[in-house]
């Protein structure tokens, strides 16, 4: 099965930028049932946010476990957040994340695009 | 008016991005640039939805946050989304046969794209994007600068001694623009810029519409109130309640705005607020009405939600008290090695000690405090530890004087990384000043305040310890500003709550503690006299009430007053988390009473009673803390007051004992057979 992930940046200097990843192109890391996409300031991150100084080198992970998407904060300095009733809520550990929901890594908001 | 070109808008956007240290042009900067055009298309169509440009700009800035001083790229690039939006705008222009996009094209493009920070923020503010998109397409400015002529008359109950200011009348005319005539029945409250009136609109055929309550205040306050109403109140109102049905009236040319509360289930009666009712008719029968009308009707959705809520008292009550510091802004060069640094997040205990050591002229460095408001009239920047509706975010207020508060320099919700100032006043200074203005006939420096033959704790020395306590309480939807002026009553006794500017989820008992303060300070004391002796007399009756001792007084005013307070206490009894732990309420009451001594709107007598009441309640809380101590085998164990703050037993035992109240009664009430021998 081919897995795809499209992420759109929703704020900051890269607002509107799309990242398209797919297992077909060998993106991310695939082992067993899990496909992982890394987010951070490190150049070899799958989603590299080099313009946000509030992003840690390895900041967060998004992975597919065969059923759904999960968002994991990698003990980042400035945190990963979701939006709950208009207020930002810090993610501790791993939380489920749905396409269309906004989350923030450092100062950068982003979202998983729904796929057909 | 000359057409506004894209160039002009981009210049504004550039200024905005530099000021916010973003250094890129995003859709949010383009939108803010559009909003900054005086009388522009964007602000005109937002007005139709009751939003002002400044309010929206601040909300967008809050969402985006100020950037960091380091910049990781050169120049000021457009974001991919801004490029997209500018392209859409260009298409709109081409369709209309123009070479260059203008104000309307850009606004339409931003709303059409509808996935950007600007439209996301608008949605959280309750704006209808589809309606805005349509309005942006078709809106044509009219030359209706002058609102239609509206005849204003005054009802018999209106107090003419104080005229309504022109600024307020201007808003009022806009609010009732669809009627030819209005009659202002009465003024409910008038405090600073806020004005609350009962208004009857009159139609062209002289038919009178149902009276409404019109509230006019600073636009930010009014729009915040609408947000809170939508979020907290709307879904939790009983059938008979004051409702906001129309969007607010917020003209761009005024710093004020207005809203109308419609009194549903009000058929042709003109309500008055309890403050007026009590002044005219006294407190007679009020206690019963409060229980049957107000509490019975609202408690299901409000005070009876009873979610368990364990909190440290400062989190719910610190914001009530004066700012912890008033600072004079100072230059960065004045920050020295031994300056006191207050860094958020912080450790309460450590900060408490540091604050105690501060004196006039000391240098303080604030880090990560959040802007609550920039008051242009007094030139004071108001800060606290967070931003939002919750009480704990408004705790640790600091006022900073002498900064450049030119419009746009600071926005509400902005996190200020660092600010240097010199101490002008501490919270303690402010409270002592307020206490001195009561012209005490006793020494303010002692641990005790004499009250007749007995004494109460000095509230000026105890509030910090109260703020340290942990409470196992309950949380519910609360009004947040419950006082006699915010409860309306009709001739048949039916009651409405108005003014939801502070409604939130908070400590359930806060509402009732504030209401008791209001009854004692605004109604009971003014009906008697202002002397300390009268305040002490009333205090003795409150002691009796605390111990549920039957009250007898030959003065009917006092009897009725105490009946009313007793009704409040009956309500409190139902709301207590543990029905035997009254210290949950007494803590709230102590802090609400202490807060009231700083109010210049409360009578002198009222504030004197509040000072003593705060001391009495602090004492009551100390008693409660002693109970577990006497019940446990180890007398050295600490009670609920946290370590280091418990009072030596000798102090507490030597307390206020009113003439009619003997100690064994107090002990019995607490389930103790005899007072432990004083071993000290």
Image (cartoon, coloured by chain):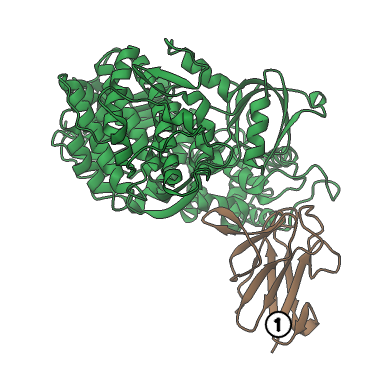
Chain colours: A brown, B green
Residue visible at 41% across and 38% down in the picture: B676
Residue B409 visible, this angle = no
Residue B664 percent location from the top left of the image:
30, 34
The quadrant holding residue B66 is top right
Q: Nearer the viewer, residue B26 or B643?
A: B643
The quadrant holding residue B393 is top right
Residue A98 percent location from the top left of the image:
58, 71
Residue B307 percent location from the top left of the image:
40, 55
Reply above or below: B545 against B234.
above
- Image mark count: 1
Quadrant holding the N terminus of chain A: bottom right
Name the side, left or right, on which B168 lies relative to A73: left
Name the side, left or right, on which B309 lies relative to B306: right
Per the image, the residue denoted by label 1 is A34
Q: Nearer the viewer, residue B667 or A21?
A: B667
* Image mark 1: chain: A
Name the side, left or right, on which B241 lies relative to B472: left
Quadrant holding the C terminus of chain A: bottom right
Residue B633 visible, this angle = yes
The outermost residue toward the bottom is: A1
Residue B165 percent location from the top left of the image:
39, 18
Badge 1 density bin: few <14, some 14–19, many ≥20, Cα 10 Å: few
Q: Nearer the viewer, residue B439 or B303?
A: B439
Reply above or below: B274 against B557.
below
Reply above or below: A76 against B540.
below
Residue visible at 71% across and 40% down in the picture: B20
Q: Nearer the viewer, residue B538 or B263?
A: B538
The kind of secondary structure element at disc 1 is strand
Reply above or below: B349 against A9.
above
Name the side, left or right, on which A6 lies relative to B470: right
């Amino acid at each position: 099965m081919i897995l795809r992930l499209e992420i759109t940046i929703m704020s900051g200097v890269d607002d509107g930028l799309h990242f398209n990843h797919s297992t077909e192109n060998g993106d991310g890391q695939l082992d067993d049932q899990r496909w992982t996409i890394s987010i951070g300031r490190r150049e070899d991150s799958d989603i590299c946010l080099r313009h946000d100084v509030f992003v840690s080198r390895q900041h967060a992970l998004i992975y597919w476990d065969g059923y759904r998407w999960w968002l994991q904060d990698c003990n980042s300095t400035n945190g990963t957040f979701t939006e709950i009733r208009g207020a930002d809520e810090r993610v501790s550990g791993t939380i489920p994340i749905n396409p269309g929901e906004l989350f923030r890594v450092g100062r950068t908001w982003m979202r998983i695009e729904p796929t057909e | 008016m000359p057409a506004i070109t894209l160039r002009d808008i981009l210049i504004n956007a550039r200024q905005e991005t530099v000021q916010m240290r973003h250094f890129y042009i995003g859709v949010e900067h383009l939108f803010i640039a559009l909003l900054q055009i005086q009388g522009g298309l964007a602000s005109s169509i937002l007005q139709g939805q009751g939003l002002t440009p400044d309010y929206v700009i601040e909300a967008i800035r809050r969402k985006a946050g100020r950037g960091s001083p380091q910049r990781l790229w050169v120049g000021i690039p457009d974001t991919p989304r801004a490029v997209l939006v500018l392209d859409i705008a260009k298409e709109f222009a081409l369709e209309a046969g123009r070479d260059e996009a203008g104000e309307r094209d850009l606004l339409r493009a931003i709303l059409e794209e509808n996935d950007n920070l600007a439209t996301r923020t608008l949605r959280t503010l309750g704006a209808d994007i589809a309606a805005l998109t349509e309005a942006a397409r078709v809106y044509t400015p009219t030359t209706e600068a002058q609102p239609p002529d509206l005849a204003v008359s005054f009802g018999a109950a209106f107090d003419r001694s104080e005229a309504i200011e022109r600024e307020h009348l201007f808003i009022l005319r806009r609010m009732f623009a669809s009627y030819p005539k209005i009659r202002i029945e009465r003024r409910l409250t008038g405090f600073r810029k806020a004005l609350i009136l009962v208004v009857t609109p009159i139609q062209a055929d002289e038919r009178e519409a149902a009276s409404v309550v019109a509230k006019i205040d600073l636009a930010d306050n009014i729009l915040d109130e609408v947000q809170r109403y939508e979020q907290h109140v709307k879904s939790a109102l009983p059938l008979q309640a004051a409702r906001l049905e129309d969007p607010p009236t917020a003209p761009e040319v005024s710093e004020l705005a207005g809203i109308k509360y419609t009194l549903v289930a009000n058929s042709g009666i003109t309500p008055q607020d309890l403050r007026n009712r009590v002044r005219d008719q006294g407190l007679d029968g009020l206690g019963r009405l409060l229980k049957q009308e107000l509490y019975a009707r609202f408690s299901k959705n409000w005070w009876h939600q009873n979610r368990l809520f364990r909190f440290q008292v400062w989190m719910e009550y610190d914001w009530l008290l004066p700012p912890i510091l008033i600072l004079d802004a100072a230059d960065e060069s004045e920050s020295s090695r031994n300056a006191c640094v207050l860094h958020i997040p912080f450790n309460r205990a450590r900060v408490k000690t540091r604050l105690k050591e501060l004196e006039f002229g000391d240098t303080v460095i604030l880090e990560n405090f959040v802007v609550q408001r920039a008051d242009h009239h007094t030139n004071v920047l108001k800060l606290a530890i967070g931003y939002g509706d919750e009480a704990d975010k408004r705790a640790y207020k600091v006022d900073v004087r002498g900064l450049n508060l030119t419009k746009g320099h600071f926005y509400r919700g902005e996190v200020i990384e660092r600010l240097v100032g010199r101490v002008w006043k501490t919270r303690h200074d402010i409270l002592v000043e307020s206490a001195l203005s009561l012209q005490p006939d006793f020494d303010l420096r002692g641990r005790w305040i004499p009250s007749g033959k007995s004494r109460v704790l000095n509230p000026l020395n105890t509030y910090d310890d109260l703020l340290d306590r942990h409470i196992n309480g309950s949380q519910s939807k609360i009004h947040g500003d419950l006082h006699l002026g915010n409860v309306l009553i009709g001739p048949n006794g039916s009651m409405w709550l108005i003014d939801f500017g502070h409604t939130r989820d908070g400590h359930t008992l806060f509402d009732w503690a504030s209401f008791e303060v209001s009854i004692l300070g605004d109604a009971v004391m003014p009906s008697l006299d202002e002397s300390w002796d009268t305040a002490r007399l009333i205090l003795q009756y409150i002691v009796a009430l605390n111990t549920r001792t039957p009250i007898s007084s030959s003065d009917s005013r006092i009897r009725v007053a105490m009946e009313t307070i007793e009704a409040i206490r009956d309500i409190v009894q139902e709301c207590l988390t543990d029905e035997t732990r009254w210290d949950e309420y007494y803590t709230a009451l102590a802090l609400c009473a202490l807060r009231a001594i700083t109010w210049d709107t409360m009578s002198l007598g009222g504030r004197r009673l509040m000072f003593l009441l705060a001391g009495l309640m602090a004492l009551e809380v100390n008693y409660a803390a002693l109970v577990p101590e006497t019940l446990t085998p180890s007398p050295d164990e600490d009670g609920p007051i946290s370590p280091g703050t418990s009072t030596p037993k000798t102090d507490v035992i030597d307390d206020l004992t009113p003439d009619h109240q003997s100690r064994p009664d107090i002990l019995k009430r607490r389930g103790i057979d005899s007072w432990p021998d004083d071993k000290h």
